[in-house]
Image (cartoon, rainbow, N blue to C red):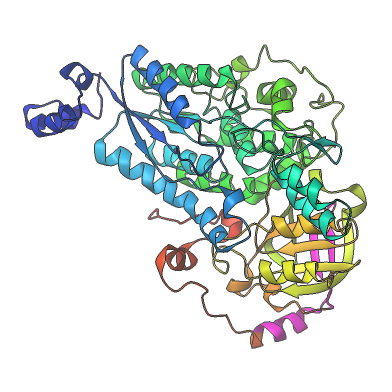
């Protein structure tokens, strides 16, 4: 059987390389087996990753049992929550492409035969999937698992986003400083990816829906024994992929990507899905556009309600049956022949799945909503596209008109909201926060949470060329493309302009005549870059539009 690693360590000319391995304690027997990478994003900065040493240990056991030699290496992983609402957030989305590049470099430089990819959080899981699709070697994703919910707050188990809502409540005297401090100690009771259906858990779920994790791997909690069992089984599974020469592109196909989009619609996944799935498709050389999302949103109902769409959290969703139960309910809409990392089809994997809590997961004929949880909008304010999440928007706010209140950064908007300058009927416009203009397309989560906490979520709206966390609520539209820094119409919105957000008809409209918009754009001058050196300077020049996944394109056509 052919193994890539044998090209460099098998022949006599590989003696120096074998010697280098032996200097680390590897034996001749170790070097006669496939070398299987464990790409581990463990660190002590990210709650979703702090348990990955234990997970990696279980993976190693599985690889050894399957006849391989595990070789572990690390790569970067940032925490969206810790990096949020300050300069650090500029780096988070751009880190996704660095992660893919980092993994590519380590695997190709050392000619590894397969890889198990360990990570849990927002940009890490898509970055790992991008690397797997690009490299097209045997690969499997092992998330570290999600965090359990915290103390009860506002009618549900709290999580870290509850503090943002509570901050707004504190500002208006709805809760005390003592209550706020008590929450801080109890909203995040242990490690794992944050317990809501934000980007991290959405992407873990979609990795499972795509077939790149074992069944249950997308939702098993971080502290569960099931997580370690899945890790060991994943080590065995990657050895089967190597032995059968099943590579990532056998699994990441148009059919499996569309299955993932359908599941995202059904579970009310994060708006960031519309950045990450196109980026993964780009690496797999699969043609997926935002129109695919819109078509599937109209065709796939919302059948699983997890916060922010409802009170349940992801551990609740797991106990209710998880991704497999959702896919079983969606069977008539899915490509059931799509292959998965355990060697079976999706159809076979979900055959015995069942819904264990109908308050969390409903049947196809009794959905929470007839349409999916995400929506793609267009209009004269978003000539290419914009993105919203109707699953998290109150029905009364799905059609909203108001007067623009314009800010050129998240900080400006946050300061104005704290100062009481945003009032009922306003449409908060935050621009120059796109991939190029931000740069890095920061999350505007703090703004929406402040609006919620200050009782403005049902009387104001938020539109931006930035992006959102998966937990936004209120009325919001992001990813406006072209972004302000590219001279999109959002660059010339003025205070007082009337804006209409029409979610049912997928329209985002500024009520200004076309010739006036053109006159304003003719006078518009592009601002100086915010970062003139370092990675962000480079990223701002080469990142694609949000409508194309904000990916760094590298293929030559």
Is residue 224 visible in the rendered image? The answer is yes
- In the rendered structure, the answer to whether residue 366 lies left or right of residue 354 reads right
Q: Position of residue 135 (x, y in %)?
A: 37, 39
Q: Position of residue 327 (x, y in %)?
A: 69, 24
Membership of 262 in magenta stretch: no
Quarter of the image with the C terminus is: bottom left
Q: Which residues are magenta?
A: 496-521
- In the rendered structure, the answer to whether residue 282 lies left or right of residue 485 reads left
Frontmost residue, 70 versus 241: 70
Above or below 439: residue 26: above
Displayed quadrant of residue 311: top right
Frontmost residue, 409 versus 327: 409
Above or below 203: residue 536: below
Residue at screen point 29% across, 40% down: 108
Residue at screen point 42% across, 41% down: 131
Residue at screen point 89% across, 53% down: 174
Membership of 520 in magenta stretch: yes
Residue at screen point 73% across, 27% down: 317
Frontmost residue, 284 versus 529: 529
């Amino acid at each position: 059987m052919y193994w890539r690693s044998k090209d460099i360590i098998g022949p006599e000319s590989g003696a120096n390389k074998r010697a280098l391995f032996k200097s680390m304690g590897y034996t001749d027997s170790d070097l006669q087996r496939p070398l299987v990478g464990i790409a581990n994003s463990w660190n002590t900065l990210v709650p979703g990753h702090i348990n990955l040493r234990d997970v990696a240990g279980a993976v190693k056991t599985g690889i050894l049992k399957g006849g391989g030699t595990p070789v572990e290496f690390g790569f970067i992983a940032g925490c969206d929550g810790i990096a949020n609402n300050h300069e650090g957030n500029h780096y988070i989305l751009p880190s996704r492409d660095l992660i893919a590049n980092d993994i590519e470099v380590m695997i190709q430089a050392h000619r590894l035969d397969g890889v198990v990819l360990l990570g849990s959080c927002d940009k890490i899981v898509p970055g790992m999937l991008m690397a797997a699709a690009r490299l097209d070697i045997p690969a499997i994703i092992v998330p570290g698992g999600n965090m359990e919910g915290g103390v009860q707050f506002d009618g549900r188990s709290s999580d870290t986003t509850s503090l943002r809502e509570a901050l707004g409540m504190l500002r208006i005297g709805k809760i005390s400083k003592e209550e706020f401090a008590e929450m801080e100690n109890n909203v995040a009771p242990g490690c794992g990816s944050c317990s809501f259906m934000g980007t991290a858990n959405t992407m873990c779920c979609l990795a499972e829906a795509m077939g790149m994790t074992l069944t249950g791997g997308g939702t098993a909690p971080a502290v569960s024994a099931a997580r370690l069992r899945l890790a060991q089984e994943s080590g065995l599974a990657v050895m089967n992929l190597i032995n059968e020469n099943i590579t990532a592109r056998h699994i990441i196909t148009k059919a499996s990507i569309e299955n993932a989009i359908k599941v995202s619609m059904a579970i009310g996944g994060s708006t960031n899905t519309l950045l990450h799935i196109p980026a993964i498709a780009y690496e797999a050389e699969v043609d997926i556009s935002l129109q695919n999302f819109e078509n599937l949103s109209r065709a796939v109902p919302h059948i699983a309600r997890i916060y922010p769409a409802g009170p349940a959290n992801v551990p609740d969703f797991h106990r209710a049956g998880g991704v497999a139960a959702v896919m079983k309910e969606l069977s008539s809409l899915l490509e059931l022949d799509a292959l998965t990392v355990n060697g079976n089809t999706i159809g076979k994997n979900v055959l015995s799945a069942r819904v264990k809590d109908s308050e969390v997961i409903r049947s196809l004929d009794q959905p929470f909503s007839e349409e999916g949880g995400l929506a793609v909008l267009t209009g004269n304010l978003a000539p290419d596209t914009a993105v919203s999440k109707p699953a998290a928007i109150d029905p009364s706010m799905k059609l909203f008109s108001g007067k623009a209140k314009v800010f050129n950064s998240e900080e400006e908007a946050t300061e104005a909201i704290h100062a009481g300058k945003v009032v009922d009927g306003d449409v908060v416009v935050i621009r120059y926060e796109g991939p190029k203009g931000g740069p890095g397309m920061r999350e505007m989560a703090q703004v929406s949470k402040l609006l919620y906490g200050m009782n403005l979520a049902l009387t104001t709206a938020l539109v931006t060329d930035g992006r959102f966390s998966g937990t936004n609520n209120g009325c919001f539209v992001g990813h406006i493309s072209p972004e302000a820094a590219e001279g999109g119409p959002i660059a010339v919105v003025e205070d007082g302009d009337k804006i209409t957000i029409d979610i049912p008809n997928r329209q985002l409209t500024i009520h200004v005549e076309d010739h006036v918009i053109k006159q304003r754009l003719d006078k518009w001058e592009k601002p100086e870059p915010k970062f003139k050196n370092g990675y962000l300077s480079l990223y701002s020049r080469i990142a694609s539009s949000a409508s194309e996944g904000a990916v760094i394109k590298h293929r030559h056509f």
